[in-house]
Amino acid sequence: MHHENQLLVIAVHLTICSFSKLSELRTEENENSSPSLSYALHCPPPPGFNELVSHREGEETIADEIDGNWYSKALELIKKDEYNITYSEEHGAYQSPNRVNNIRFIYHNDGFTAKARDVNETEDWFVRLKVMSEKLKFGHDDEINGSKSSIAKDNSDNIQSSQLTVAGNKAWTENESMRIDYVNTEEGMRQDFIVKQKPSGKGNLRIDFTASTKLKMNVGADALTFSDKNGGVKMKYSALKVWDANGKPLRAYFEKNSELRIKNYESSKADRSFGEEILNSEFLILNSFSIVVNDADAVYPVTIDPLSTSPAWSAESNQASSSFGESVSTAGDVNGDGYSDVIIGATDYDNGQTNEGSVFVYHGSASGLSVVADWTAEPNQQRASFGSSVSTAGDVNGDGYSDVLIGVLNFDNGQINEGKISVYYGSASGLSAVEDWSYEGDQDNSWLGTSVSTAGDVNGDGYSDIIAGLPNYSGGETSEEEP
Ligand SMILES: [Ca+2]
Ligand SMILES: [Ca+2]
Ligand SMILES: [Ca+2]
Ligand SMILES: [Ca+2]
């Protein structure tokens, strides 16, 4: 099999169906010397799928039955949902990507870690921001400088032991003295400290923090910036706004306390899982700083509200936020209610893994399509490009419910960027939570799943077949699995 312009055909066994190998076909229209791979799923014939829409590179066609208004609304919601804070089993922490700022925030009870959303050779930094000391330490200047123990006593219930609660793009943690709110939006990640009661003593209200990082922390009155050795600002902790219970603005500023360099720092296991391993030759800098608030005439509670952003990235941010590399198709009728459903692939969607991709299915109804997805799936593999192509599969298992095909262009499982196609079966309640059938490229850079579609009945045996593009397949025998 050394001819480049072949349509490679493989018969794959699927337990509930029967199979036979399809004959090899030559395709005239195969441009770019790109063979395609066709998988035959020999199943009972699908109910008719004339409504197939395929969205290929260079084509912006959306089927007539997929309303353009609905589509743009659904995409807007997908983009917004990416800012949600979700628990990552893999990393054992809550996290949220922030595409516009190219930051991933990891949430802890006592603060957060910011790092590049897309970690690579040039974007590999982190800042771990923490409310200082074993106990939440805040109070007035004179107490900080005088008897520190009295402040600790005021806050016996420390913030580190309180639970982080998460809803959508918000998270919060709270004890008797303070509440910390997090809100992740395109604007940046906002962290609000709500100090419930006025600490005893005189002088300014002061909250102490540490910032551990390899970056250089620069302290200005109204901003902290963290920059690399070339002076490029990676993260900015700024837009410090403070107000009291009546909404009255209070004067506040950042103040640097000390800087401690730690050589041969070993990061914790949890930190390492986020790629925060620090080379032995490098220093970890433990910066200490305070937010100081003039609360002389303030009515408590007082809210302290800094914003975390990355100014360096903002030029490209709009572009970065505008595209996931979407693919869209009718999904057939995956829940058998008589209404056509729609499938959208967001190839670069980030839900814990950079550009893993995600797929969203929307059930049709008498009142049309909801912009809230009824079904989603994701690969939990960095840069897998799940949803690189999406399509109805017809009804490959003959149960009367439409099934869907999902291409996973850059999927790795033994081979790098081998790609995969996945099939999820429909049911009365919609698509399965986990894939029911899949096939891998099994060759480095074969990128199986560039395109997927139902082929109808290619060999006339009465069963629905699948075609999956395999742009870079090369070499001898195709792998064949036969019953
Ligand atoms: Ca339906
Ligand atoms: Ca994920
Ligand atoms: Ca089915
Ligand atoms: Ca493989």
Image: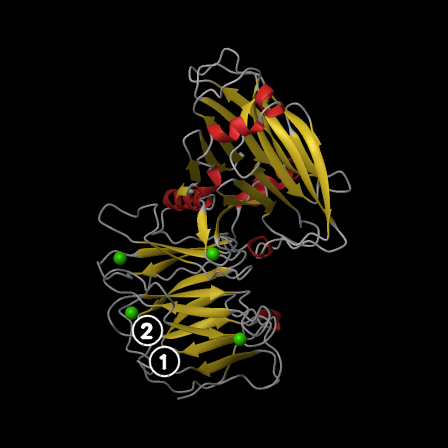
Which secondary structure, mark 2? loop
Front one among 320 and 90 = 90
Query: Going 67% across and 33% down the picture, which residue do you hit?
Result: 225
Answer yes or no: is residue 217 visible: no
Answer yes or no: is residue 118 visible: yes
Q: Is residue 45 above or below residue 299?
A: below
When asked about the image quadrant of residue 171, the answer is: top left
Q: Is residue 111 left or right of residue 126?
A: left
**Quick one: quadrant of the N terminus?**
bottom right
Label 1–label 2 contact, CB within 8 A: yes
Q: Is mark 2 within 8 Å of ligand 3?
A: yes
| Residue at the far top in the pictured view | 297
Query: Going 30% across and 74% down the picture, which residue do you hit?
Result: 397
Name the amino acid, label 2: Val
Mark identifier at residue 454: none
Mark identifier at residue 396: 2
Q: Is residue 145 left or right of residue 156?
A: right
Q: In this figure, which residue is indicated by the disc labeled 1?
A: 14
Q: Is residue 200 above or below residue 352?
A: above
Which secondary structure, mark 1? loop
Q: Is residue 300 left or right of residue 186?
A: left
| Residue at the far bottom in the pictured view | 483
Relative image position of residue 472 (x, y in whole percent): 60, 72
